[in-house]
Amino acid sequence: MSAGTTAVAAPATQGAGHGAPATEAPTWSDAVTRATATCLDVLARAAATTPTADPSAWHRLADEQRSARQLLDHLALGLVGYTGLLIARPTDRYITLFASLDPQAPIDACLDGLRIAGTLLATTVRHAPPEARAWHPWGHADRTGFAAMGVVELLMHTHDITRALGIAWTPPDGLAGPALTRLFPDAPPGPAPAATLLWCTGRGELPGRPRVSAGAWNWDGRVR
């Protein structure tokens, strides 16, 4: 998601009704911290059990192109990338710093890397000035936008990984709601935030609505 190039539609004039997105930096910083901790908790429990039950589990496809293990690298890249964008604030390009995890490291050590990446993003969001803006292909964003992107990345890819590992897990509504409202202004109101976020990102179904194709969605990070 962090390297996509799909154009964004014009922002909606009315929110989706899943809870107003926070505007204060500490609140969004805390959201990134809580999303990181929540996702790492379930992934750590998975890492502790799957090597014994099925050593190949982390090499299963978790989305159309990447394995569960490869999604850990994608998460590290995304979280550090959003941090770098918010620090460097380019207007027309991605940053030149790319993060990756040690390919030889065990899963539990890789999770330490994700904790570092999440902490970097949360700290940067907390201290970024409210007027800070930076480029993103899905809408130039401020600190709230990049924080929400980090939350969505963590929730959605943890969902992808747990599904690949055969673990039932649903993102918490309390984390999904503000991120959904901030990045998906046209999301349908009514259903639980987590279910709606899964639908918006091509990972779930909502009654009476066509399924969103996995590669045919994007968020709108622009400041509103």
Image: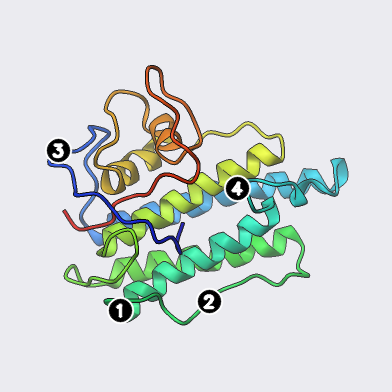
* Residue underneath mark 4: 41
* Residue underneath mark 2: 98
Cα distance in 3D space between marks 3 and 1: 29 Å
Location of residue 130 with respect to 46 vertically, above or below: below
Callout 1 touching callout 4 (CB < 8 Å): no
In the image shown, does 29 or 144 lie closer to the viewer?
144
Residue drawn at point x = 41 percent, y = 23 percent: 206
Location of residue 222 with respect to 93 vertically, above or below: above
Callout 2 touching callout 4 (CB < 8 Å): no
Question: In the rendered structure, which amino acid carries the disc numbered 1?
Answer: Pro
Mark closest to the chain's N terminus, 2 or 1: 1
Mark closest to the chain's N terminus, 2 or 4: 4
* Residue underneath mark 1: 90
* Residue 128 on image: x %, y %: 27, 72
* Residue 199 on image: x %, y %: 43, 33
Mark closest to the chain's N terminus, 1 or 4: 4
Under circle 4, the secondary element is helix
Mark closest to the chain's N terminus, 4 or 3: 3
Q: Which mark is residue 14?
A: 3
Cα distance in 3D space between marks 1 and 4: 34 Å
Residue 173 image-quadrant placement: top left
Cα distance in 3D space between marks 2 and 4: 25 Å
